[in-house]
Amino acid sequence: MHFLSGPAGHPLHPILATLPVGAFVSSLIFDILTRTKAHGLPWLVDGAYWLIGVGLVGGLLAAVPGLVDFRTIPRRTKARAVAARHLTLNLVVFGLFLVAYAWRATDPSSTTRHRGANSP
């Protein structure tokens, strides 16, 4: 077995995938809280920005063993079709979060980190 397949033949991809999933879901929760609180919580905007960055790095780390696992699935099987849909959906979601991250990084009004510590 390849070392990216995981210890003792157990897949490594599922455990690594928890990092981006958790980071992306947490960033969504932070954004919802920022919009629904009466005075907003501007520090959560920064948190969401950093969580998206962590999710993107984690997604790349999880993709490597995921692709190794994908290559081992026999062609023309139901499992391969499910895995292909999983791969496609994850690429779309990753792309959307990448666009959101780039947008936040270039929009000075979207995060508090651009305003400085002493600004109101």
Image (cartoon, rainbow, N blue to C red):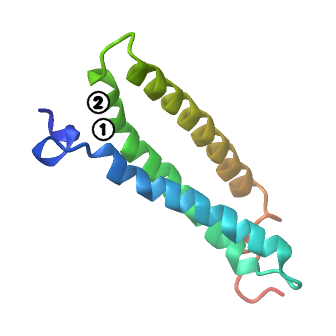
Which is nearer the eye, 13 or 96?
13
Residue 8 location, quadrant: top left
- Cα separation, mark 1 vs mark 2, equals 5 Å
Measuring from the top left, give residue 20's x and y in whole percent: 48, 54
Q: Relative to residue 81, is residue 69 drawn left or right?
A: left
Residue located beneath label 2 in the image: 68
Q: Quadrant of the N terminus?
A: top left
The structure residue drawn at horizontal position 80% and vertical position 86%, both measured from the top left corner, is 119
Amino acid residing under circle 2: Val
Q: Residue at x 38, y 45 (%)?
A: 62
* Residue, far top: 76
Q: Secondary structure at mark 2?
A: helix
Q: Nearer the viewer, residue 117 or 94?
A: 94
- Relative to residue 76, is residue 98 drawn left or right? right
Specify the farthest residue to the front: 78
Q: Contact (CB < 8 A) between labels 1 and 2?
A: yes
Residue at 62% x, 72% y is: 47
Decide which of 75, 51 is in the foreground and name it: 75
The residue indicated by pointer 1 is: 65
Residue type at mark 1 is Pro
Q: Secondary structure at mark 1?
A: helix
